[in-house]
Image (tube, rainbow, N blue to C red):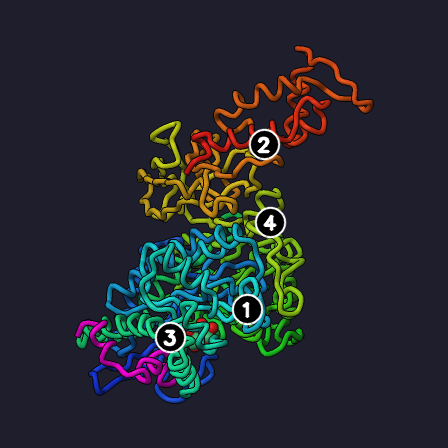
């Protein structure tokens, strides 16, 4: 049935009822009209379908499912196709399980390494986050299952997440925190968007008309429904008016009743309710009409994808003297509890009841013929930070007897979870001490890290290799063996900067804020935008990742050397595998703006491609850049604007390792429609085409410099330049004050009006 017709047949109570869940995970059915209920489930990196007791903190059991690499790991793949493939697989699992919407992906920006939910999020960079999310959404939705892009927006801490207000200026919101959502919404059209718990500049995300309606729908063209984060509704009727369509979970009828009353007493237009119901029903019907009854949740097959994915995500941070890959027959000591019981996912609503978990040590034991000389020592206990002398001693002994020690370290479950933030950036004390002790016994040491967010590495100089495995999903153990022994050539790159210490992070002074107010005072200088602009030393830069092979970039060509911001720039790069193994390179394109009048980061990521190359193979990679790649958000214009000037296109292997640069002169076409007043400075006036001619008579009438006595001297040729410099910062009204009585306010005002009529200042 046509949705509008269906809605017209519903009673007020039925319509109000449809705007909140039937229970924790289902929308309401209207059997009388054949409207089915639709199930939604978490997300993002696996299916958390709860059949029995429901909760949003991952406490109660859900069905056995496959845990893919968490967002922190998936993003490090820099691989759009992989995200699509994972999405497609999740979509199929949902079809098999009758789930209509999977609650993810989550694209909140990693403002601080401390955010407890960083493990679920992708990046400190909004372009990377939105590109990856768009592909995952497209993958899921290709199976006619919806996604819920979350948490919209500015939910960058767990501390007071349901009451805190994220305070930031419009430019910061647009360039960083909204941008992570914008690209994904525009490209992939998620069926739903989930609004966050927090407030934004004082207004709850659930009630934020500006973000939910003006930006999301009107500007970006979102046409799905907005669902509340679980319990995020603060005042149902204004929330509905602002653009929040579905409340989850159920409100036990209380908020439905409020909606009914508001319509009856005329405080809520019924058309607003109808609109929300239409939006919800459209997606319910969409899922219903495309049910795939043949879909099968093949856990073994999906586990194999989880292993492949985990291998694509791991980042080889350090590999001195090519210690890695290891030989399978070498005498090795696997040290650390995470070798036997890997930490592979985070805590909270994303927690998957994994169908099986592979540990590196478990697989070695199962295949001892293949790995004949590996020993294991627990090294530390994840239930405590306390050093165990016994465990440490056994580990040191094992390391002494081995050619190479491989320490499986990282953050225990209690360190990182939805619901609270970390308080520091260190590894637990017992693990840090273990690394010191083992490296003293055997300098040939590799550290494999399991963590959802950066850690400090005071021991970095003492170890020969570091492999960042992040929270790699249930197949992480197999993927670790694949990478450690070279079956898979590592190709992950960091989607976030690892600072040397927490205090270096740009949000350090303001993170978590005061009471219920968190000011984002670092503005757009998030992550590498800050570290790189400040030229600070970091542990590992954004985009960093090593390989077992080597690549060279021999040329970068732009298809033009000047353009208007309405044109498209094509950049072609040639990349060659100069090493001996097949490998994948992640080419990153940064754009560096000219020194203009706007304060901007030194460069920003605007393109990336992952390419696979056999030894000796060369490929040409093409990037296209459009206006947004050069633009900043202009708060006066309330729009994106490109400053005219020479921009540098940088091709990098990381944000700090730029291989090639080229320049492009860009002419900005957006007009600065700032009207001229008596307070406008001469410097600004002179930028307006045609203004100089209008100002000429006035300047001639002024024609003077004034000293303290107020005496005037005629302006000579030689002082014209000085005069021009001084005039630059003088407002138009200064002509009256310093004009020795030759210019009056009416003259100055007339000039201002004449300039305002110039074509350059018209729409
Ligand atoms: C989380 C969401 C999740 C929802 C349902 C909330 O606590 O913030 O990400 O989708 O619960 O479990």
Q: Circle 1 — which element?
A: loop
Q: Nearer the viewer, residue 217 or 341?
A: 217
Assign a secondary structure to mark 2.
Answer: helix
Q: Find residue 246 and name its label.
A: 3
Q: Is residue 391 visible?
A: yes
Of the residues under marks 3 and 4, which one precedes in the sequence? 3
Left/right of residue 249 with respect to residue 716 in the rendered view: left
Q: Give the labeled residue for mark 4.
A: 538
Residue 476 is situated, as x and y percent measured from the top left of the image, at 42, 67
Q: CA distance from mark 3 to mark 4?
A: 44 Å
Count the marks.
4
The residue that mark 1 highlights is 116
Q: Residue at x 22, y 80 (%)?
A: 9
- Mark 1 or 3 closer to N-term? 1
Which residue is the extreme one toward the top? 717
Residue 477 visible? The answer is no
Q: Earlier in the sequence, mark 1 or mark 2?
A: 1
Extent of the magenta region: 1-27
How packed is label 2: few (under 14 Cα within 10 Å), some, or many (20 or more)? some
Image quadrant of ligand 1 equals bottom left
- Image quadrant holding the N terminus, namely bottom left
Q: Are marks 3 and 2 in contact (CB under 8 Å)?
A: no
Marks 1/4: CA–CA distance:
22 Å
Magenta span includes 350: no
């Amino acid at each position: 049935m046509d949705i509008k017709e269906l809605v017209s047949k519903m009673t007020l109570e039925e319509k109000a009822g449809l705007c909140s869940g039937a229970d924790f995970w289902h929308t309401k059915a209207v059997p009388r009209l054949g409207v089915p209920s639709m199930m939604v489930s978490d997300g993002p990196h696996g299916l958390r379908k709860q059949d029995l007791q429901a909760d949003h903190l991952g406490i109660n059991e859900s069905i056995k499912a496959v845990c893919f690499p968490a967002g922190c790991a998936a993003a490090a793949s820099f691989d759009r196709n992989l995200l699509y493939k994972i999405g497609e697989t999740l979509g199929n699992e949902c079809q098999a399980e009758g789930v209509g919407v999977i609650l993810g992906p989550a694209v909140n920006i990693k403002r601080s390494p401390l955010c407890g939910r960083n493990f679920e999020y992708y990046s400190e960079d909004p372009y990377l986050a939105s590109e990856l999310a768009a592909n995952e959404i497209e993958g899921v939705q290709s199976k006619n299952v919806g996604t819920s892009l979350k948490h919209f927006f500015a939910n960058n801490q767990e501390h007071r997440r349901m009451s805190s207000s994220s305070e930031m200026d419009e430019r910061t919101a647009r360039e960083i925190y909204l941008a992570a959502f914008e690209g994904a919404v525009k490209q992939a059209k998620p069926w739903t968007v989930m609004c966050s718990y927090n407030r934004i500049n004082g207004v709850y995300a659930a009630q934020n008309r500006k973000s939910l309606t003006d930006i999301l729908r009107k500007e970006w063209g979102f046409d799905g429904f907005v669902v509340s984060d679980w319990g995020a509704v603060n005042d149902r009727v204004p929330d509905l008016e602002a653009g929040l369509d579905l409340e989850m979970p159920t409100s036990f009828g209380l908020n439905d009743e409020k909606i009914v009353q508001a319509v009856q007493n005329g405080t809520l237009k019924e058309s607003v309710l109808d609109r929300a119901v239409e939006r919800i029903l459209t997606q319910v019907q969409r899922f219903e009409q495309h049910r795939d009854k043949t879909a099968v949740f093949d856990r073994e097959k999906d586990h194999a994808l989880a292993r492949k994915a985990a291998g694509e995500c791991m980042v080889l941070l350090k590999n001195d003297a090519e210690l890695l890959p290891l030989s399978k027959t070498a005498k090795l000591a696997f040290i650390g509890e995470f070798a036997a019981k890997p930490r592979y996912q985070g805590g909270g609503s994303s927690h998957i009841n994994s169908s099986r978990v592979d540990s590196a040590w478990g697989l070695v034991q199962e295949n001892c013929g293949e790995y004949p000389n590996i020993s294991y020592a627990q090294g530390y206990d994840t239930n405590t930070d306390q050093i165990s002398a016994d465990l440490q001693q056994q580990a040191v002994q094992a390391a002494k007897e081995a050619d190479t020690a491989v320490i499986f370290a990282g953050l225990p479950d209690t360190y990182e979870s939805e619901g609270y933030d970390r308080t520091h950036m260190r590894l637990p004390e017992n693990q840090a001490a273990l690394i010191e002790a083992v490296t003293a016994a055997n300098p040939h040491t590799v550290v494999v890290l399991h963590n959802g967010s950066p850690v400090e590495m005071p021991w970095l100089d003492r170890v020969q290799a570091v492999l960042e495995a992040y929270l790699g999903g249930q197949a992480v153990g197999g993927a670790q063996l694949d990478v450690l022994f070279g079956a898979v050539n590592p190709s992950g790159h960091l989607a976030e900067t690892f600072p040397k210490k927490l205090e270096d992070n740009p949000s350090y002074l303001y993170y978590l804020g005061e009471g219920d107010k968190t000011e984002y005072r670092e503005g757009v200088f998030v992550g590498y935008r800050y570290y790189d602009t400040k030229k600070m030393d970091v542990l590992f830069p954004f985009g960093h990742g090593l390989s077992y092979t080597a690549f060279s970039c021999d040329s970068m060509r732009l298809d033009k050397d000047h353009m208007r911001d309405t044109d498209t720039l094509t950049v072609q790069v040639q990349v060659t595998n100069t090493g001996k193994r097949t490998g994948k390179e992640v080419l990153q394109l940064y754009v560096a703006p000219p020194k203009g009048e706007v304060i901007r980061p030194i460069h920003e990521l605007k393109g990336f491609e992952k390419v696979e190359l056999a030894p000796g193979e060369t490929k040409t990679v093409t990037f296209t850049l459009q206006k947004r790649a050069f633009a900043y958000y202009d708060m006066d214009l309330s729009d994106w604007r490109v400053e005219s000037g020479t921009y540098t296109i940088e091709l990098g292997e990381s944000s700090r390792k730029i291989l090639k640069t080229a320049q492009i002169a860009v002419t900005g076409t957006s007009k600065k429609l700032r009207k001229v007043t008596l307070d406008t400075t001469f410097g600004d006036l002179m930028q307006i085409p045609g203004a100089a001619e209008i100002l000429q008579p006035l300047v001639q009438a002024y024609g003077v410099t004034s000293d303290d006595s107020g005496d005037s001297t005629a302006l000579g040729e030689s002082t014209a330049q000085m005069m021009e410099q001084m005039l630059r910062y003088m407002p138009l009204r200064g002509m009256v004050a310093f004009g020795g009585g030759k210019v009056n306010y009416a003259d100055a005002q007339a000039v201002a009006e004449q300039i305002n009529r110039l074509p350059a200042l018209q729409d």
